[in-house]
């Protein structure tokens, strides 16, 4: 609503100020009673005089304003503008002061129009005023503004009643107009300052919102999962529009899915949305389709806008970011599809590897059991025909012993394979953390190799403080070193009479760093790239390719550390292991 200025003045000056204010449609002039402060004007007296639609007030006067105290809370913003002399409202300061100094009694057209009422208010009737006026005035000075054609006649009557000569001073509205224009200009400037301040505040708030929105959009572009993308879209729309309610309907393969409760009528409208957008039933919000290309990713309902008048602007902002929202959801779904495909491919590789590893000992066991069954059938037939000899029985027993040994060995092989597969899934194992001396754990792992690590065959050099204690899983570290050393013995030193292994362990702050190296045959680049892959081995006769995969899982998944391998063909192998340590916790005595 447009602002309107109300100017209050004494009733004696109302015609002049009202005439001058006619130049402005948004300025109104109202008058309070002319009684020169006997008694002063009060706010309760001004309140019923306020023009309709008044948003700002200026009060002009002198002695009549002395009783105004603090501005009431229900009053429009008000400025009090006192003047040195009330007649300064219609005439210049010098002119008024000269008239007063010369002993003039000053009157205006409005005062003159009711001169009899004015004398009566002063306590005189026309016959008694002559002596009073002669005592303190020499003449009547009439500031003629030209608004009352009867003024000259009335001035003559007043001269007769007071016995004083009258002097007419033609002032017109030349003084009133610039004075009032200055008041209006000050009001407009103040209003413009407020408007500019509000615009700057709103602009700053919008700029802050846009910066925050850009930050949210940047985070939206980095989301990896659809639930995370939807949550970020919710945050973005809440920030931009601050609605009373925000609903999201997920759509995949053309099927709408409510991820959280939505009011029945609103959900029906969202499901029925056939265009890019639509207004809500109460026109206080909108429905928006989130798309990528021609595919619908979801539908957003923004309901209960705080400022419905700006709904077109809000909708345009929503349409501007809808494409980014659709792209983020599409990327999240593509990532999920890729992960699913990778999982299926990994599962297929795992199943094939397990089948391959188990199939060989299983086939040998089946062949041995089948051969044993055949030998048993032949022996039974000979026994039934009474043609079985002692040598037949001895041959059968020898075959049975060999076959059962073969079956047992291959069943044990299958058992070891299954246990190895179980160990590879380290995330499912229960771990027991505890403090232990690291070098003692390492030496226990070395002891399991017995004569294979004798000094004349393989030299092992250890650089580890015997007093070093860590809070970790001793069994897992033993498995790591057993697999590393076993890998060096089986593959690194294959076909060699001698070899050297160097193990260096040090604690740096809250991390444990292990350097493992051998001077074996090393690895070709193609083998180095796959060393931690499951079922990868450089010698199918010596292993099944799960040892280094187990080491990798223990270090990265169990301990949250890293392992890197460096190697070149003919130059040995080096492992760099970096693991965070659990903080030491003192136990109560």
Image (tube, rainbow, N blue to C red):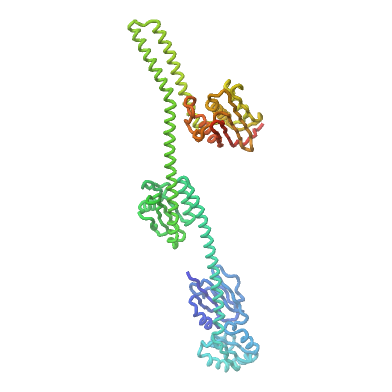
The quadrant where residue 319 appears? bottom left
Above or below, comparing residue 307 to residue 67 in the picture: above
- Where residue 6 sits: x, y (%)? 52, 75
**345 horizontally vs 113: left or right:** left
The quadrant where residue 455 appears? top right
- The quarter of the rendered structure image containing the C terminus is top right
Is there any visible trace of residue 448 in the rendered image?
no
- Where residue 275 sits: x, y (%)? 36, 55
Above or below, comparing residue 407 to residue 488 in the picture: above
Above or below, comparing residue 173 to residue 394 in the picture: below
Tell which residue pokes out farthest to the front in this image: 570
Of residues 173 and 130, which is closer to you in this image? Answer: 173
| Residue in the image at 40% along x and 49% along y | 297
Is there any visible trace of residue 388 in the rendered image?
yes
**95 horizontally vs 548: left or right:** right
Q: How many marks?
A: 0
- Where residue 508 sits: x, y (%)? 64, 37
| Residue in the image at 48% along x and 77% along y | 25
Of residues 453 and 162, which is closer to you in this image? Answer: 453
């Amino acid at each position: 609503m447009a602002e309107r200025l109300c100017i209050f003045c004494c009733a004696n000056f109302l015609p002049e100020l009202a005439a001058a204010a006619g130049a402005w449609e948004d300025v109104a002039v109202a008058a309070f009673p002319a009684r020169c402060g006997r008694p002063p004007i009060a706010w309760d007296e001004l309140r019923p005089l306020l023009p309709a639609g008044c948003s700002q007030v200026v009060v002009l006067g002198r002695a009549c304003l002395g009783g105004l105290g603090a501005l009431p809370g229900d009053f429009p913003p008000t400025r009090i503008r006192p003047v040195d002399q009330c007649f300064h409202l219609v005439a210049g300061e010098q002119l008024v002061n000269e008239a007063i100094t010369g002993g003039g009694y000053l009157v205006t057209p409005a005062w003159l129009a009711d001169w009899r009422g004015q004398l009566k208010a002063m306590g005189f009737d026309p016959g008694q005023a002559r002596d009073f006026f002669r005592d303190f005035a020499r003449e009547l000075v009439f500031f003629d503004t030209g608004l009352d054609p009867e003024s000259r006649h009335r001035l003559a009557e007043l001269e007769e009643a007071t016995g004083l000569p009258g002097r007419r001073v033609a002032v017109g509205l030349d003084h009133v107009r610039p004075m009032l224009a200055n008041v209006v200009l000050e009001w407009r400037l103040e209003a413009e300052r407020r408007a500019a301040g509000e615009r700057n505040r709103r602009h700053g708030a919008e700029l802050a919102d846009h910066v925050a929105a850009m930050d949210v959009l940047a985070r939206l572009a980095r989301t990896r999962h659809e639930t995370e993308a939807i949550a970020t879209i919710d945050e973005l729309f809440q920030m931009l529009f601050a609605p009373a309610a925000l609903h999201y309907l997920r759509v995949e393969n053309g099927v709408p899915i409510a991820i959280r409760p939505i009011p029945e009528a609103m959900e029906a409208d969202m499901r029925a949305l056939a265009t890019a957008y639509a207004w809500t039933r109460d026109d206080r919000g909108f429905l928006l389709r989130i798309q990528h290309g021609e595919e619908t990713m979801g539908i957003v309902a923004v309901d209960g806008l705080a400022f419905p008048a700006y709904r077109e602007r809000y909708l345009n902002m929503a349409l501007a970011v809808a494409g980014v929202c659709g792209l983020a959801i599409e990327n999240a779904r593509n990532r999920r599809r890729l992960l699913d495909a990778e999982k299926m491919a990994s599962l297929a590789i795992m199943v094939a590897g397990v089948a391959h590893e188990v199939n060989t000992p299983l086939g040998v066991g089946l062949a041995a059991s089948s051969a044993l069954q055949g030998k048993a059938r032949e022996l039974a037939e000979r026994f039934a025909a009474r043609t079985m000899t002692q040598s037949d029985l001895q041959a059968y027993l020898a075959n049975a012993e060999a076959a059962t040994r073969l079956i047992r060995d291959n069943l044990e092989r299958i058992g070891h394979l299954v246990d190895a597969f179980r160990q590879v899934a380290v995330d499912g194992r229960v771990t027991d953390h505890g403090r232990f001396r690291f070098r003692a754990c390492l030496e226990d792992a070395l002891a399991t190799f017995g004569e294979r690590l004798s000094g004349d065959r393989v030299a092992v050099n250890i650089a580890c403080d015997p007093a070093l204690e860590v809070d970790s899983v001793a069994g897992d570290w033993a498995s790591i070193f057993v697999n590393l050393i076993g890998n060096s013995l089986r593959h690194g030193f294959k076909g060699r009479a001698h070899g050297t292994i160097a193990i260096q362990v040090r604690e740096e702050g809250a991390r444990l760093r292990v350097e493992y190296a051998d001077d074996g045959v090393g690895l070709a680049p193609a083998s180095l790239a796959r060393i931690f892959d499951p079922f990868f081995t450089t010698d199918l006769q010596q292993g099944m390719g799960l040892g280094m995969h187990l080491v990798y899982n223990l270090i990265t998944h169990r301990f949250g550390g890293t392992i890197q391998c460096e190697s070149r063909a003919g130059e040995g192998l080096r492992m760099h292991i970096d693991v965070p340590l659990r903080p030491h916790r003192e136990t109560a005595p």
